[in-house]
Image (cartoon, helix red, strand yellow):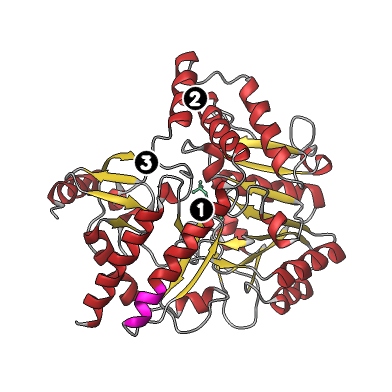
Amino acid sequence: MSTEISSKSFKQAQKLIPGGVNSPVRAFSSVGGTPLFISEGNGAYLKDVDGNQYVDFVQSWGPLIFGHRDEDIEKAVIDAVKRGLSFGAPTQAETDLASLVVSMFDSIEKIRFVSSGTEAVMSAIRLARGFTGRDDIVKFTGCYHGHSDSLLVEAGSGAVTFGNPSSPGVPEDFTKHTLLATYNDIESVKKCFADSNDIACVIIEPIAGNMGLVPADKEFLAELRKLCDDNGTLLIFDEVMSGFRASINGAESITGTTPDIVTLGKVIGGGMPVGAFGARAEIMDKLSPDGPVYQAGTLSGNPVAMAAGLAALSKLKKNTQVLNILNKRARRLVEGMQAEADKCGIKMQVDTRGTMFGFFFNENEVKNFADACSSDAKTFASFHSGMLKEGFYFACSLYETGFISTAISDEMIEDTIKASARVFKGMKNV
Ligand SMILES: *Cc1c(COP(=O)(O)O)cnc(C)c1O
């Protein structure tokens, strides 16, 4: 397998674009090697500029639930393009997509569209602060909510729950309003409420996908809901990744806990840049122009992006069984790979939610970020490069979730498991 052209392209890109990439995870830094430059996608497959073909378990990091170049989505986009790329004025497609999402999520009565998940979360936090008149927020270590200032926070030293900036360029004055708690640990959230009586919202990925796949326990979410209610605090479910992937009716439909605000992204744009946040009308009506909380976007609700989202979500809504079918494939995939790893004495933890799958090279169950970090990064890197050589494209970081699309067949799953057996055997023999 030659990747010579990719390597050349990467060198050229590195001279002009920091790290050669427009989003850091793409740089392959945690698995070594150079990133593959992609020339095209088709169904389940990605093709790189050297002509190699891979079964794609990344799916553009989530959005492409129907695989690459789904006919219906492609057609909707082309039709929209022919009517104009952007108007900066309302179009019917925005109301249609809003209506579709509202019909799928019980907790959402009104919704606003933006252009990325980062923007959706940032705006939802401002709305929660504006609605409650409070400044502090609680987030969980290991949950990712985009790259806005108050969410780029890591654990402070010792006993304090107030976070430190996790990136230069973020003033401490901003992150002092962000308190950090431990995923699946309600005592850590209680401590935040003991430290602050000014908490506007608790934000959580109800099915965390950015520390690998780590779903929250049902009981934990129920207790979180109660703590928020007791303190007049809003609960935000960040479903930018899990939305329409774990369930078509939101995590609320499978966890039994209803959030106040939901943030969406990825699948909602069918492969185009779309984010959204929604809530009951009482909260959403605080947004400008109806209310005082300002939020805006020149390309928000872009007609081409709306057309792609509308095509993707309509298709999902019409085929409600699709997530169950894909979940069976996801389960077969990770359980099959786990069995092969086991034969080679490699311990794997696996889980799935809908079309999302996760695995850790870890002897113990993973319930939070510290657990995830105790996984074997070296084994992951060997697995990743071995699978790539076999023609299977997995996310290039052990803290990412994998995705099944409708284009991935049962046969491809079996082939992936067989390839993993060869890769694990090869790793054992080194
Ligand atoms: C991807 C992601 C984001 C950020 O979305 P972008 O579109 O990359 O800005 C926010 N929250 C979660 C849970 C995500 O997975």
Magenta span: chief secondary structure:
helix
Give me the residue at 62% from left, 20% from top: 91
Q: How many marks?
A: 3
Q: Distance between the residues labelled 2 and 1?
A: 24 Å
State which region is magenta: 338-343
Type of the residue with mark 2: Ala
For residue 145, above or below residue 225: above
For residue 362, above or below residue 71: below
Query: Looking at the rendering, which quadrant does residue 430 occupy?
Result: bottom left
- The residue wearing badge 2 is 76
Type of the residue with mark 3: Gly
Rendering coords of residue 390 (x, y %): 23, 60
| Within-10-Å neighbours for mark 2: few <14, some 14–19, many 20+ | some
Q: Is residue 389 toward the left or the right of residue 64 in the image?
A: left
Residue 288 located within the stretch drawn in magenta: no
Q: Is mark 2 on a helix, strand or loop?
A: helix
- The residue wearing badge 1 is 326
Pick the front one: 245 or 373: 245
- The residue wearing badge 3 is 43
For residue 83, above or below residue 119: above
Type of the residue with mark 1: Leu
| Within-10-Å neighbours for mark 1: few <14, some 14–19, many 20+ | many
Q: Distance between the residues labelled 2 and 3?
A: 17 Å
Q: What element carries label 1?
A: helix
Query: Looking at the rendering, which quadrant does residue 311 occupy?
Result: top right
